Amino acid sequence: MAGPIHQGRTGSPTRRSPTRRTQQDDEQDSRKNLLLHKSLTPGLLIAASLTSPEELIDKNLLELNEDSRVSLQLSDIKLLYKAKCEDQNLQVLPKREDRFLELIHKSCSGLLFSLKEHGLGKESGEAIYQVLSNNQSYSILELCGNRLRDDGTKALSQLLEVNDSLVRLDLRSNDIGGKGGDALFKSLRHNCTLTSLDLSGLSGINRNHIGIKGAVSLCSMLQVNRVLSQINLGSNGMGADGIKLLCNGLKNNHVLTELDISSNNMGIQGCEYIANCLRFCSLKRLIMERNMVCDRGLTVLSNMLKQHHNNTLRHLNISENKITHLGVRDMCSMLKLDNMLHTIKLDGNEVGDKGVEELSAMLEVNKSVVNLTLSKNEIQDLGCSYIGKCMRINRTLRKLNLSSNYIEDPGIIYIANALKENKCLSWLDVGHNRIGDEGGVVLAKSLLSNQCLQWLSIKENDMRVAGEHIADAMRKNNTLMFLDFTYNNFSYKSYSFISDALKRNIRRYEGGAKDRLKKQITDLQKNEQILSKVNLLTRKEIELRESADDKYVQEQENIAALNDKYSQEIAEAKSLLQNKHQERRDAEARFQQKMDQFAVEIHTANQEQRKLEQRIDSERERVVRLKKEVLMVSEAIELSKKRADLEKKPYLMELENEERRLMVAKEKNKTEESEYDILKKKLKALEKLATSESGGGMSLLTGSVSANARASATPTKSNLRGVGTPVDRSSASSTPTKGKKNK
């Protein structure tokens, strides 16, 4: 059992000292963190009750290996187990607890605290914070493959602010989002111990996704952190915008040397940001796999390195980025001038034979590239001919990977013939190709003369008989120590010969360490004169430094005096600062009180505003309804007017006709009145004439004539009706009245 020996499985004490021990003594023993390597057997419980670990250690009867020591209290382990059960909704059981104790003993010993893929969540994150906040024994914290998410990561962020021993943190695949990344990067701004951080994603679920929000905090952290040298941000969904923020942080950072931003969908735009950033930072290792960089992105990167001659970048991984021979051509033009890159990985691209031709021409003049990987690049025999040509000239390439291509017998023959002359290549992988017995036989012959190749893979090809030739060649080859020929149908005899030869070469290499050291010593002896001059210069330097010691001591005394003075000033400044802090806290409290009051007022105003807005909305709806009603009434009025106009039209026409007839009647009446006046005058004249001539008989005649004249001049109703049918009674009745008056 991995736990303190002063407590058994049931929780009851299993060791009792001969003398009575106080609770303070037990607590002191628990603080010493003395742990056994495994569970005590029942027979040892009696011995444990008669002695103590301190006594066994003092008598050299018990030795603790620091590498296997678990620096955790039993209470800490129980706290972790309980938190794990809460995260997984499991019942706390003694058997499970025992298994967890054994797990802690195996995975949390020495400097390593590892709980990978255990379903840890928020509660476990808080428990780890409580356990390790005051524990400075662990330097590596591995929690990959769990479910810490944002809340659990926030708890670990608090741990980084108080723990001064952690140097590496592994949080791969913990479903950490922008909030968790923000808290983590903020805690690292002033952290002075953590040098390596891994936030990449494992294959499967729970991948991290810090995104743009996490990238903002990452940018500000990189601008002030002066310790973090390695960071892995693969598969975090940062995109081109997140890469831009990352590069802004790297422009003022000269500590970070290794950066992995694989699978972040940064595209060509993100590659441009990286290219501009490399001028200012100190990156030595850059990994950009699966980012859709394409030819244009590689061209931008190559042009930048060509113009500014970056002096720090040594390792470049741009695998699986759909790069063709066009992008490789631009990169090779840069590498012909710049001899800084040591490792180039182009696996899973579309380089083809044309791209290999460009690379081979570059390797003929480049003296820095030692590792080149071209797996899964559709390389055929023509490309191998270019590689074979450059291998005869190049003297720096140590490692070459050509696996998973379309290489057949002619292609491997080019490479095998080059191996007979090559004196530098020590690692070659041509597995997963189409090499048959013909190429295998030539490769076996090259092993007879090659004395530098130490690692060779011909896995998954079509060799059968070639196995015997390789076995014969291995009898004389003394340098090859690893040969992978699986899935090639070699005979058991060939397998046995090859295995024995490899073991022999390994023993010979290990046994030749003495000779190699002697050779190195001989080489050093050749430079003995130079070393003697260096020693002479060193003695002079020592004398100069000794003469400067007095000055240094005097300066130290002055510095000590200044330190005392400054310490006093610092103490006064601290007290003043504390007073200022107190004043600031008081001001913050008052400000917070006012802010709370202001928040209440804002809330009340917002409620009133919402009520007014609701009332305004209702009034607006009412106005809209009224407008609709007014519009409908207006339309009805217009329709009524149109109908009235249509109905009045015939009556108006009839009235006009009647008025015209009335005018005709009036004209006729005037004519008759004028005739009546004439007759009246004639009548008067006749009356006068009759009066003067005859007297009475004549007057009777005159009366009858005047009566007839009046009857003929006076208009009657029947005459007026005959003129036309009257419509207006007033106009029709006015004519007879006038006639009577005239009469």
Image (cartoon, rainbow, N blue to C red):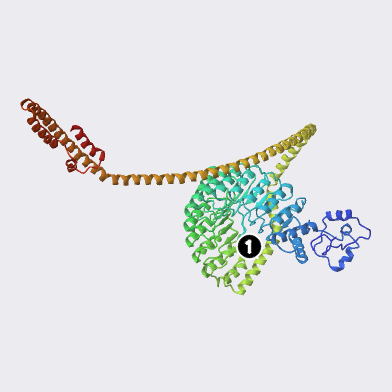
Residue at the far top in the pictured view: 692
As drawn, 230 above or below 109: above
Say above or below: 439 vs 176.
below
Q: Nearer the viewer, residue 131 or 391?
A: 131
Q: Position of residue 622 (x, y in %)?
A: 49, 45
Would residue 416 be seen by someone viewing this image from the given angle? Answer: yes
The reply to whether residue 278 is in sight is no
Decide if residue 237 is on the left or right side of residue 386.
Answer: right
Q: Spot the residue most to the front.
A: 696
Residue 614 sits in quarter? top right
Q: How many labels, in total?
A: 1
The quadrant the N terminus occupies is: bottom right
Q: Percent from the top left, x then y, of residue 149?
A: 65, 55
The residue to which callout 1 is attached is: 479
Q: Position of residue 723 (x, y in %)?
A: 17, 42
From the top left corner, tell me how far across and down residue 209 is, in percent. Answer: 60, 53
Per the image, label 1 sits on a secondary structure element best described as: loop
- In the displayed orientation, state which residue is furthest to the left: 693
For residue 263, above or below residue 408: above
Question: Mark 1 packing: few (<14 Cα in 10 Å), some, or many (20+)?
Answer: many
For the residue marked with disc 1, what is the amino acid? Thr
Q: Nearer the viewer, residue 612 or 429?
A: 612
